[in-house]
Image (cartoon, helix red, strand yellow):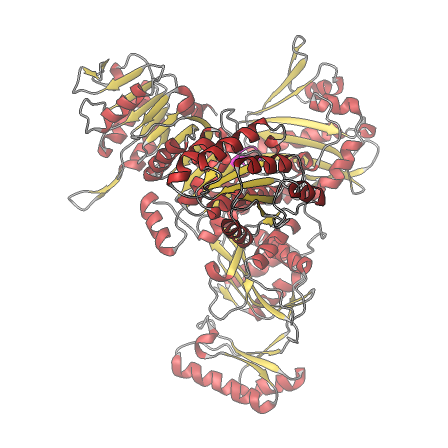
Amino acid sequence: MSNIAAFLKPNSIAVIGASNNPQRIGYIVIRNLLTGCFNGPIIPVTPKYTSVAGILAYHSIDAMPITPDIAILCTRAEYGPEIITQLGEKGVKAVIVIAADMTITTTKNKAVNYQQQMLVNAQRYNMRIVGPNSIGIILPWLNLNASVSPIPANKGNIAFISQSAAVCTTILDWAQNKQIGFSTFISLGDACDINFAELLDFLSQDTKTDAILLYIDSIKDARQFMSAARAAARNRRILVLKSGRTMAGRSAALLHTSGETGLDEVYDAAIRRSGMLRVHTTHDLFAAVETLAHSVPLRGERLVILTNGGGPAIMAVDALSNRGGKLATLSAETINKLSHVLPAYWPQANPIDIMGDANIERYQQVLNILLDSDDFDALLIMHSPSAIANSTQTAQIVTNTLHQHSRSQRFNVLTNWSGENEAAEARSIFTQAHLPTYRTPESAISAFMHLVEYRRNQRQLMETPLSFGEITADPHYVRSEIQQLLRQNRHHLETHEIRPLLESYGFTTLPTWIASDAAEAVHIAEQIGYPVAVKLRSADIRHKSEIHGVVLYLRDANEVANAADAILSRVALHYPSARIDGLLIQRMADRSGAQELRIGMYNDPVFGPVIMLGEETIHWDISRDAVVALPPLNMALARYMVINALKRHKIKQRSSLEKISIPALCRLLVTISQMIIDCPEINAFDIHPLLVSGDELTIIDASMDIAIFDGDIQQRLAIRPYPKEYEQLCQLKDGKQVLLRPILPEDEPTHKSFISQVSEEDLYKRFFSDIGELNHEALAKFTQIDYDREMAFVAVYDGMIIGVARALSDSDNKEAEFAILVRSDIKGTGLGGILMTKLIDYAKQRGLSTLTGMTMPSNRGMITLAQKMGFEIDIQIADGVVDMLLPLK
């Protein structure tokens, strides 16, 4: 990522608009660079001064003695485009733009977009920009403070990327107090060019970075962001603070960054789907940062609480319960040991209340007993001001005990020393000892639950889905039917119009008949049997409830006739010009014991199609009544969606009704996801309601909005769906027919079986080491891939994987590295050549310029195959490797 490296590994810096005036940005940037002790050349450029801060200045950009790695623009917005051109001619490839308000209105009421002009000029020279409206970047490990921040950053292992300058300085001020350091600190500002995705790609490989924090106002390229976030979250812990949770907040964010904001619930779903963790307030962010800075990966969710006060412990338990956390259960052995050092009246349960008369020695004894046990995964140590156990002295003894105990690093330890005057010095001791510390029980629990929720998101990222078989619908038929409706200028469709489309995907719907008047409605009702429902059919009235256009449970001819006449009369009175296309007659479904759910598909302006699930209500509001998920869904992801809806009470398992079948509901959600993928003409889809009785799911009413679609189907979703177009049947030399297709998450069991049937020698040649038995996490990384940046083709015969070919491309989509593995007993059948050809065709279609690979000199089969396919071979005997390179352009 050479175009990003210039920003994050610079050797020289120019400051355009440097100044000796303390009130100018150019002065602050120079001062910060000097104060930070940056070790490379600093080049002030200004026509006003001979020197700036004692450094020789240059009157123009072309007069600079060298081409700097970074230029910082401290000039007014209107000078930006011309300066970018001058820097481009000088060969500068990285620029930070401090100026804000790049889009202005002149006195002649004419809008001038300096940002767009600047971006066009930069692209001409292959130049990258951070900003505008940025406060700069800070790289503590390089002693580089190329910013206007009044507060420096200490060295640490957390990277911070923010669209808000104010949030940047707030975080820096808090971090100074908590002695928390950073590996990288970047103010993106309006992010007109370099964005979160590119920085996530870079920082996820940075050895100085263990965790990444993002402050987001808006995302401009959801596909790129999701792809980078999903990859980075496998390697680094990532926290997100997203503003714009309310409608007013979204409007403010839109003004702040000029980007589409989208629904907050959709951002929530995207962050979870990526394996990241979202926090909702700066207070939560501070707590989470402190926990991340000092924590080890959470091995489980069991929390034990050690306290000298029952009240604060109860508050902690309440907070834990409200957040869905788990208290650890103490074993009989641990209770017995604790009973030997605690008063006879201690509760003998978790929380472990060592009583208000506890001295320092009691804290130490109990702590050692707990650290010797395996009853918990995390420990919260609490202390209320006490005349017997001094706050500061107790903190020091606790810290010493933890550091001296050999098993303390196996657990996450959090501390809560309550109070201000008495506890301030104690909390300082914990901070210096790199132990997270909090003022209140609730904030300590909140920090612990951040670790828990992050772990859950990571597990979701790695869960192997069940397969429920192929969806048998014919998408070509469905699309042709939709396009036929579009040719008739039909854009909003009701239940009776989309019933054939729904049934082609296997959905159960209620039969529907059309009547032109009350008499025909009665005749139909007599034929199908009572009770029935009568509904208005009118393309001009989208919400039938506005005129009571739906009447249910009609039990005889009189009721049907009266309901039909009443509906038509209300339309004539309130919408006299509306077209009436008749009345819909449906037999009432058996609702006894059944529950009514609502499922919708909404086209988010940022993330594209999303799926919503909740209970049917009269005034359905997504933010209040539904959970959201991004397609494509598989059974594991659908199950998370349903469980999330149950946990958040968006749907309820009512004891008086037939219990909802979670697998059946998951299958329906996965099928809806596939329908959305197959049919890009669907702009919106609403099932209202879905009648659920056990595993019987019936669509009572549905509506759909459709529109002409002429774009790339694969680019429509924020996450690239399974690329079915790559499926291909091939024949081996021995006559076997094999299916070549992209790998699926559901392939994990068969992939494990495949690996077990490859000889140790062949595995060693593939992986350059003895790999032993692959665990679930390793297999998940092999099977749960991002089709946007990597590909794995599996050769399947008789339901079993017999070969795999992989290509992993760089983030610039220029080069991909390949690997091929064939089951040892299949070698010699020509499968390796078939897989290699498939990879080369794929790489060319992706527009890659080079395909590379590496093997051992002893792997003659792979070397011979590569030579046959046109690869350039470079045998490096000294290193024991063979490099293979195929130019594709």
Residue 458, percent across and down?
A: 59, 41
Query: Who is closer to the viewer here, 792 or 867?
Result: 792
Query: Who is closer to the viewer here, 172 or 805?
Result: 172
Q: Main secondary structure of the magenta part?
A: loop
Q: Residue at x 47, y 64 (%)?
A: 489
Residue 447, percent across and down?
A: 50, 43
Residue 502, percent across and down?
A: 62, 63
Using the image, determine if residue 336 lies above or below residue 765: below
Q: Is residue 100 visible?
A: yes
Q: Is residue 228 visible?
A: no
Farthest top residue in view: 878
Residue 663, percent across and down?
A: 68, 57
Q: Residue at x 43, y 40 (%)?
A: 286
| Highlighted magenta segment, given as a residue range | 232-237
Circle count: 0
Using the image, determine if residue 841 lies above or below residue 643: above
* Quadrant of the rendering where the C terminus is positioned: top right
Left-right relation of 714 to 773: left
Residue 685 colored in magenta in the image: no
Q: Quadrant of the rendered structure where residue 171 is?
A: top left
Left-right relation of 10 to 836: left
Residue 233 colored in magenta in the image: yes
Q: Residue at x 49, y 44 (%)?
A: 444
Q: Quadrant of the rendered structure where residue 127 is?
A: top left
